[in-house]
Amino acid sequence: MKGFTALRIALRHLRSRAFQTFSVVSITAFSAGLAVALFLLAQGLRLGLIRAAEPFDLIVGAKGSPYQLVLNTVFLQDVPVGNIPWENCAALSDDARVGFAAPLGFGDSYRGYPVVGTTPDILNVRVRASDPPWLRIGEGRWCFGESEFEAVLGARAAAETGLRVGDVFQSSHGVVQSSHGLAAGGGYGHKHEEKYRVVGIAETVHGPYDRAIFVPLGVLWKIHDPHHAHEDEEDGHAHEHGEAEEAHDREVTAILVHPKSYTDAYSLAVSFQRSADKQLVFPAQTVVRLFSLMGRGEAFLSAVVWAVGGCALLTVLLVLYWSGAARGRERALLHVLGVPRRTLVFISWLEGTAALLAGTLLGELAGRAGAGAVFALLSRTTAVTPAVPLTWQECLAPAVFLCAGSLGSLAAAWNGSRTHMERLG
Amino acid sequence: MGQSPREAPLLEIRSLRHEYRQPDGSRLRVLRLDSLRAFRGEALAVAGPSGSGKTTLLHILAALVQPSEGEVLFDGRSLRASHPSSARWRALSVGYVFQDVNLLPDFSVLENLLIAGEISGVPRAAAQERALSLLRRLGLEGRRHNRPAKLSLGERQRAAVARAVLHAPPLVLADEPTASLDAENARAVTDLLLELCGESRSLLIAATHDEAVKKRFPRLVELNKLAELNKEGRIVP
Ligand SMILES: Nc1ncnc2c1ncn2[C@@H]1O[C@H](COP(=O)(O)OP(=O)(O)O)[C@@H](O)[C@H]1O
Ligand SMILES: [Mg+2]
């Protein structure tokens, strides 16, 4: 008998036991898909977060949780930490160890998109020294005309708000996001009266800053200046505030610091360790520490995935074993017709392995699709763009499943071939 | 009876004994056949009550079971069951008909015949032609695309006979091929077996305990029920 006939018999068996085949394929696809999806999610998230942190060498901010500072500054999530006086930024710019220092002011938003007050220093940021600038203008021009109410939209902010160059909008105080990540800012805090005019749209940075709305830092100070805010009702009263108060209002939320060298970075870190009200963080390190915190959860999750896979494997083998056992009479018949025992084992093995292979391939596709869907959702709300690299590791779990299942089906087939002789006659 | 004195027997049995070892260690003697010679083109009925070892004998003749004692020569060569080559030998040399469940349930009648042809190494075109002509003769041409479950018992047995003689094997073994059938179908199937085996000059050996069937065979081998031995080899009363 030719191998082709064996394959035809195996495929016919799979077709005529459609429900069993469906069960084996779907159980396999489910557990393989789960493993693939979770692996890709963990991996993609890790790469996406690390990539998002890349443009930020060092961040200086108010003392507090470094995670909050990073979450706020790098990922534009969470409520901003407290502010620090502007003088810190000026001092850092003058520091010999610092290449440049770019101030960042947070606190306002437009329809959920964070307004980021900054200065032209931010245009010096490069992910790597050889790279082009991190922020590039795609359309229009930059908006650093000091006190003008002008804004440049991040690529995603532009696309999703529909604002174009020349449009005007009003920002609100506060950065509130509804559960599905879209703006609910209008209902929170108060709307600032001043209108920004869009003068440019940035090119995509493939990261959270695609959601940013850049405005001159000086304009933020103007809006939040108590004199300014109450000008209309208490005109006379406002002028009584002295110069000291004015200086106090010139604050920044975070300072992005580019050190001249590694040595300078650590030297800076040491000098900030003694500070009572400020901290310096290495965002990349903070993200990695965040992962190690998450790592325990991930280990638990992967244990669950392996357990699910194990249970699925046992179920699949049980189905294969019983459907093989139910074919004892047919194997006996084929043996009498002259099919050698090893060919009978091969047919049964082929049946099981074909179903498992279909299941694992389906699971691989489903897992990728599932991870892709979660990534799409994630990047819509956070603009973290997770990378989905095709690596051999993601195929590891399905491959282990396939091999174990295939071996199991070989064992079941062998066992079946030993008993079928008794069914003759 | 077709054989000439000079022709060598296709099948020769010498002091054949078979016992099954039981779980308690005792042995069940089920078969004793001191000698038998049979030639191509002959038709032989193996008769005997239930449990007299008819099925066991056919299994031994098909090299499915190795006898406890004695020897079976096919074409002058000793049969060795469970030898890797025995399946190949069976595919080429033996056609087998069971009492029932002869056909693969997931394949049509025609496919069942063609698969048997493939297993026996009959070229596809020749197998197709032979299968169709057999099915036509057996009145099953119109049912060739049906699964076995759709056929009556009589039709299934006729298809099984066609399957067994498709490659014109030198030896055709039939184990109570008519036991599930009514008298009319039983006669029809017996006639077919005798006719088709005669045409291909196959040696037909059919186990039966049906008197009417038995009478239609030119040669008869009677088997008797043997006794059970205990662990010490003594006869259990
Ligand atoms: N594999 C076996 N193991 C033990 N006893 C068996 C086995 N096969 C058949 N027998 C016994 O051998 C005897 C003869 O069986 P069998 O050859 O099937 O006879 P028949 O076909 O004439 O009815 C019966 O008593 C049966 O129970
Ligand atoms: Mg029997």
Image: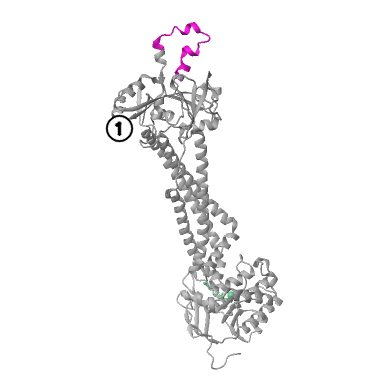
User: Can you say whether A88 is above or below B98 in the image?
Assistant: above
| Magenta range | A220-245
Q: Closer to the camera, B191 or A102?
A: A102
Whereabouts is ligand 1, in terms of quadrant? bottom right
User: Can you say whether A308 is above or below A279 in the image?
Assistant: below
Q: Please state the total of marks drawn on the protein image.
A: 1
Quadrant where the C terminus of chain A is found in the figure = bottom right
Whether the magenta-drawn stretch holds residue A232 is answered as yes
Does label 1 point to a residue whose CB lies under 8 Å from ligand 1? no
**Place of residue A86 in the rendered image (x, y in percent of width and height, measured from the top left):** 38, 19
Residue pictured at 54% horizontal, 32% vertical: A160
Residue pictured at 66% horizontal, 73% vertical: B180
Residue at the extreme front: A140
Residue A329: quadrant of the picture = bottom right
Residue pictured at 52% horizontal, 45% vertical: A369
Residue B185: quadrant of the picture = bottom right
Query: Element at badge 1?
Result: loop
What residue sits right under mark 1 in the picture?
Answer: A261
Q: Is the magenta stretch mostly helix, strand or loop?
A: helix
Q: Closer to the camera, A77 or B25?
A: A77
**Place of residue B190 in the rendered image (x, y in percent of width and height, measured from the top left):** 66, 80
Tell me which amino acid carries mark 1: Ser
Name the subunit of mark 1.
A
